[in-house]
Amino acid sequence: MHTRSLLALTTLALTLASCASVPAPTSPDALSPDVAAETQSVQPGALTAQALPALSTQPLAFSQLMSANSGWGPVERDQSNGEQAAADGRTLSLGGQTYARGYGVHSPSSLVFSLGEQCQTFGVDVGVDDEVSGGSVTFQVWADGVLLADSGLLRGTDAAKKMMVNVAGKKQLKLVVTSAGDGPSHDHGDWAAPTLQGCMPAATSSAEAQESFDGPLVITRGGTYSGHWESLDSSLPAVRIRTSEPVIIENSSIRGRGTLIQGFHTRLTVRNTRGISLNPEFAGRSPGRFVNLEEVYDVHLENNLLEGTGGIYIRQYRGDTAQGETIKVLRNLVKNIDGRQSDGNGGYSDKAFNWAQFVQLNDVTRIAGAEIAWNQVINEPGKSRVEDNINLFVSSGTPISPIKIHDNYIQGAYNALPATDAKFSGGGILIGDGKVSDPTKNGYAHVYRNQVVSTTNYGIAIAGGMGSVLENNRVLSSGRLPDGSPVPAQNVGMYLWDAQGASTLSPSTFGNNIVRFNTIGWTRVRGGVVDGNAYWWPAKGLNGSATISTTVLGTSVTLETERQEFLRWQDKLAQEGVRIGAQ
């Protein structure tokens, strides 16, 4: 059973945790039952290409939304802004014309959607909603960091304005409403009837596309596989790999009520693939992992889309470093890692959950060349329940080849009821987790140039191990949910802690951990009092561990600061020419 221990520290009011692991199955068949009647075993040559349908026109789908911010209340779907509460708007209305679809916002606001370079034109009607008598705004359409169109000044008395914008070859669409320079009063803006025209099929969201899915797949030979597979049985993986020969899954869509891809003794590459988890529809079960792999030799997960999954779980590395076998998780686009348990009736429990992480490495020791980089992970409050976004449990690189965790953007880690739950042990990036007796089996990670935003209990942390370095990271949180309400479980931005007391063991399994040149701003809002809790260094000085030159932003971090951090990330992607997600 997956357990997690909590330690209450009254002097610092911290709730910091170490994460234990799922016991390993003893054989491939222990991973899930064989249901021969519901699986298909396919050889590489048996797959045939599917004919592509004609270019289409489709709504700008809510499931394509990557991030959303609004100046007053949340962004509303298919209704006007209303007031500060969620779902308190009315039918979208511009100049007396009503609209069934669209997004209601309040300036300043920003909506970011994934396009995947699949559509030619974006069309929309914009204006100030009829529910207010005043207001003055401008609407801007951005794509891949470039301003493509500006509506000019629009007031509440103006008719709707039609905008048609060329978005050919664009990966991300950003819709911005500004206050037009005269303040945000009554600035209720509508993006009404937003559509994408001239679209290839991949631009349609998996949740809304009418794709044809085959049943569960069993792979018994190495090769390259492309297709659409699903499992509507939460106990049966959508794809099961039963070979140690190299397998490539690419240009595919996989969805299911349980684990999406499962393997034992695998050499696996998954790239340009969409993984969508469905509600398990079984009380007490959580959405399945995107991949759940045991005793691996070589794993590469690159340029995929993960939505609503339990993330990536990899237990025990058995590869040959001399042959270049390693683990890499690169350039994935991730939305809402979810460990909430299903209520069995299409919904989720407010309290019950299973552990879920974007990446969990468990007993991956002495690995060379491992890398987790350039991933974007956004978890929304009330729609996700992640523990540690990235967790290294009893896992290690080597002194000359540490596990590299760099240039990731991680936003959000919340309990199922984030506005009321005062205890939560999850957060951003946790390394050195777990207890070992061999100092080579925990640590040796290099964590650098990451951006971690609003992950509640902590941002980035070392909880144990040897020889790890945290440097040049940005860790920020306003301590508030998107609607402005405080997060009761808000804790500390960064910490260096010998959680297991390993520095006193012989041999010591804690030491030589360095934290340097990081920027931290971690605001807490408690009982109307605003303070900061940027860092906690109880292990500073232990066995050569040290902290150097931390930049602290104090209590100045706001929701707007968080929004700007995402823009910083987008600019970084553009400047480096990095493409994330399935294309």
Image: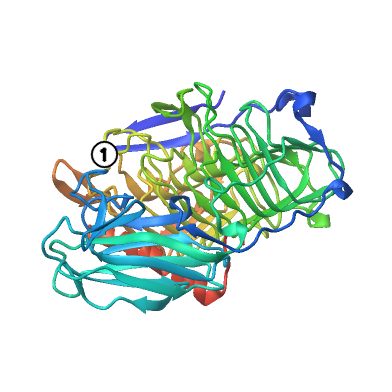
- On screen, residue 50 versus residue 68, left or right, reads right
Quadrant position of residue 5: top left
Colour setting: rainbow
Residue drawn at (54%, 71%), measured in percent from left and top? 120
- On screen, residue 257 versus residue 449, left or right, reads right
| Whole-percent x, y for residue 63 in the image | 47, 50
In the foreground, 331 or 437:
331
In the foreground, 491 or 95:
95
Q: Is residue 174 above or below residue 309?
A: below
Quadrant position of residue 16: top left
Q: Residues within 10 Å of mark 1 (few under 14, many from 20)?
A: many
| Whole-percent x, y for residue 499 in the image | 46, 38
Residue drawn at (57%, 43%), measured in percent from left and top? 276
Image quadrant for the N terminus? top right
Q: Is residue 157 visible?
A: yes
In the foreground, 280 or 3:
280
- Residue identified by numbered label 1: 488
What amino acid is at disc 1?
Pro
| Whole-percent x, y for residue 74 in the image | 27, 50
Residue drawn at (11%, 65%), measured in percent from left and top? 134
Residue drawn at (72%, 35%), measured in percent from left and top? 216
In the foreground, 436 or 295:
295
| Whole-percent x, y for residue 196 in the image | 48, 63
Q: Which secondary structure lies at badge 1?
A: loop
